[in-house]
């Protein structure tokens, strides 16, 4: 893989991470979950979504840093 191909893949990965982060941020809003979820289930789902959101934002930062470090 040459530098151009690598940069293209990193750019596509960044866009994917950005889209996923946006969806997860929306999902993590309290109003996004159905009202009829039991409280225990709601807390569990919110916890999982929060962890995924954190990981996605971390991945986005990593990809951004790699892109920025390419000469």
Image: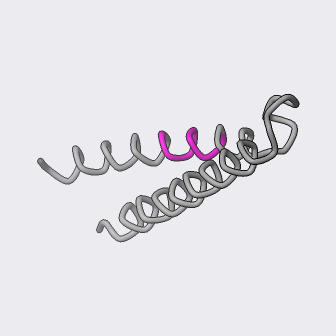
Instruction: Indicate the position of residue 59 as horizontal and vertical percent values.
Output: 45, 58
Instruction: Indicate the position of residue 55 as horizontal and vertical percent values.
Output: 51, 59
Would you say 65 lies left or right of 18 here? Answer: left
The answer to whether 69 is drawn above or below residue 12 in the figure is: below
Figure colour scheme: one colour
Principal SS element in the magenta part?
helix
The answer to whether 49 is drawn above or below residue 61 in the figure is: above
Would you say 13 lies left or right of 30 here? Answer: left
Q: Residue at x 74, y 40 (%)?
A: 26
Magenta residues span 16-22
Q: Residue at x 41, y 59 (%)?
A: 63
Task: Check if residue 56 falls in the magenta segment.
Answer: no
| Residue sitting nearer the eye, 8 or 49 | 49
Total numbered circles? 0
The answer to which image quadrant residue 68 occupies is bottom left
Instruction: Indicate the position of residue 67 as horizontal and vertical percent values.
Output: 38, 61
| Residue sitting nearer the eye, 48 or 10 | 48
Q: Residue at x 52, y 53 (%)?
A: 56
| Residue sitting nearer the eye, 46 or 26 | 46
Would you say 36 lies left or right of 18 here? Answer: right
Q: Residue at x 40, y 40 (%)?
A: 12
């Amino acid at each position: 893989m040459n530098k151009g191909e690598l940069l293209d893949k990193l750019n596509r990965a960044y866009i994917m991470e950005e889209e996923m982060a946006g969806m997860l941020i929306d999902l993590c809003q309290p109003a996004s979950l159905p009202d009829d979820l039991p409280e225990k289930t709601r807390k569990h789902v919110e916890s999982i979504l929060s962890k995924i959101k954190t990981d996605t934002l971390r991945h986005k930062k990593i990809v951004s840093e790699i892109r920025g470090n390419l000469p």
